[in-house]
Image (cartoon, rainbow, N blue to C red):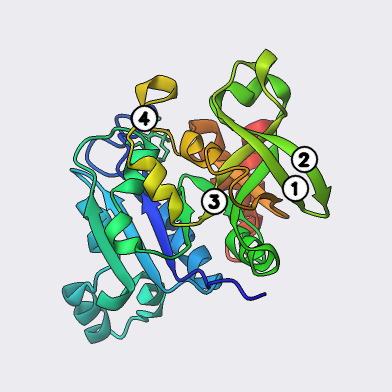
Amino acid sequence: MTHQPIRKAVFPVAGLGTRFLPATKAIPKEMLPVVDRPLIQYAVDEAREAGIEQMIFVTGRGKSAIEDHFDIAYELERTMTDRNKDISVLEPTRLGPGNCAYVRQQEPLGLGHAIWCARDIVGDEPFAIFLPDEFMHGSPGCMAQMVEAYHRLGGNMISVLEVPHEKVSSYGVIAPGKSHGAVTEVLGLVEKPKAEYAPSNLIISGRYILQPDVMRVLERQEKGAGGEIQLTDAMAQMIGKQAFHAVTFDGKRYDCGTKVGYIEANLAVALGRPDMADDVRAIALDLLR
Ligand code: UTP
């Protein structure tokens, strides 16, 4: 059986980024760089690698830097070309008009609400979601691994990873069923459970492939944990009606929504870069002495 291809991705980037203030007062959290690329660029590259063609950004006030980042910077390119500088580094930042769309979430009412704001552009086809502050580092990328599983199984897919049990209450948690390799059946989902009631220590880690029916559930605008419209609650209502699986990412995930996770991501990427690894290693060792 062939399943409808995943052509569109939604990037909810309308959050307030309060954990990174004051850095995120005037620039969005998603523009924070890991070494020399903003978080949002890594997410878009991961989507492209998975064969996704259209990027849909759900933005809010103060997020225009993201639109500028994916636009053509005429003055910059002209000046660099005049000075015989290589502009190929800008290549991945260009998203043509057919490849990107922006919608506004006027109030930050929650992740579920942000996704619902993209309903008209998504239309009636399965789509991917990326939370750019979850930085997924590996090859093939996390979404490519999920798309591979989706082509076999169809339905809905989320990426999961294991965390120490006492940390589950900050995340969406799955109730797992049977596993085959990296793929686990999802029997239930709960957002930010108390550790003692959590059905497992497998948390949802910022990547989703969902059927368009989720938009009709989100339409009801029901509020969940923290008074926000939660994507996890909407997905939970689809379990039992449609196939629902979790994919454990073969790679490393850094939670760049937290300061420590963000520092870890920068160090890990820098230590993997041939142009700087030796220098960064020497600096780190020196600081630790
Ligand atoms: P977070 O829970 O990380 O919230 O949102 P946040 O506002 O970005 O950051 P903090 O907690 O204040 O530091 C998870 C994802 O959902 C998006 C965010 O942009 C982020 O990608 N989001 C969240 C929205 O787009 N709209 C919302 O109303 C809430």
**Distance between the Cα atoms at labels 4 and 3?**
22 Å
Identified at 83% across, 53% down, the residue is 180
- Under mark 2, the amino acid is Gly
- How packed mark 3 is, by other alpha carbons closer than 10 Å (few <14, some 14-19, many 20 or more), is many
Q: Quadrant of ligand 1?
A: top left
Front one among 88 and 175: 175
Circle 2 — which element? strand
**Alpha carbon separation for disc pair 2 and 3:** 19 Å
| Any part of residue 60 in sight | yes
In the picture as drawn, the residue positioned furthest to the front comes out as: 241
Looking at the image, is mark 2 or mark 4 earlier in the sequence? 2
- x%, y% of residue 2? 63, 76
Q: Which comes before the other along the chain, label 4 or label 1?
A: 1
Q: Is residue 69 visible?
A: no
Instruction: Indicate the amino acid at tag 3.
Output: Arg
Cβ–Cβ under 8 Å for marks 2 and 1? yes
Please tell me which of labels 2 and 3 falls first in the chain. 2
Q: Which residue is mark 1?
A: 184
Q: Residue at x 31, y 54 (%)?
A: 118
Say which element carries label 3: strand
Discs 4, 1 touching: Cβ within 8 Å: no
> Residue 215 placed where, x, y %?
38, 49
Residue annotated with mark 3: 207
